[in-house]
Image (cartoon, rainbow, N blue to C red):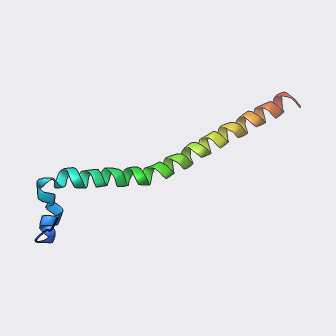
């Protein structure tokens, strides 16, 4: 598609809210996913360390 001006490009033929909202939602998810994966990994490692410590304290 050819747009006459930058304003026409950003208006996206009347579908700007849908188009830019979709891009925004995708960008947010792409940023959040690695952060949530690191948080889950940290939580799992912390849980495993606690379990290992509990086992060593139970069986000296």
**Eyeballing the image, is 8 above or below 39?**
below
Name the residue at 12% across, 71% down: 5
Q: Nearer the viewer, residue 33 or 1?
A: 1
**Eyeballing the image, is 25 above or below 50?**
below
Name the residue at 25% across, 51% down: 21
Name the residue at 11% across, 55% down: 14
Q: Residue furthest right?
A: 60
Q: Nearer the viewer, residue 37 or 52?
A: 37
Q: Residue furthest front?
A: 1
Give x and y (percent) for residue 20. Answer: 24, 55
Answer with left or right where residue 31 lies relative to residue 50. Answer: left
Answer with left or right where residue 44 lies relative to residue 52. Answer: left
Answer with left or right where residue 34 lies relative to residue 21. Answer: right
Q: Residue furthest bottom?
A: 5
Give x and y (percent) for residue 33. Answer: 46, 49
**Eyeballing the image, is 18 above or below 6?**
above
Count of labels shown? 0
- Identify the image quadrant of the N terminus: bottom left
- Identify the image quadrant of the C terminus: top right
Name the residue at 61% across, 45% down: 42
Quadrant position of residue 31: bottom left
Give x and y (percent) for residue 29. Answer: 39, 49
Give x and y (percent) for residue 43. Answer: 60, 41
């Amino acid at each position: 598609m050819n747009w006459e001006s930058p304003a026409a490009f950003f208006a996206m033929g009347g579908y700007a809210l849908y188009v830019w909202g979709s891009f925004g939602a995708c960008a947010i998810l792409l940023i959040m996913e690695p952060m949530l994966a690191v948080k889950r990994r940290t939580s799992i490692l912390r849980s495993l360390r606690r379990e290992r410590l509990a086992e060593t304290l139970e069986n000296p």
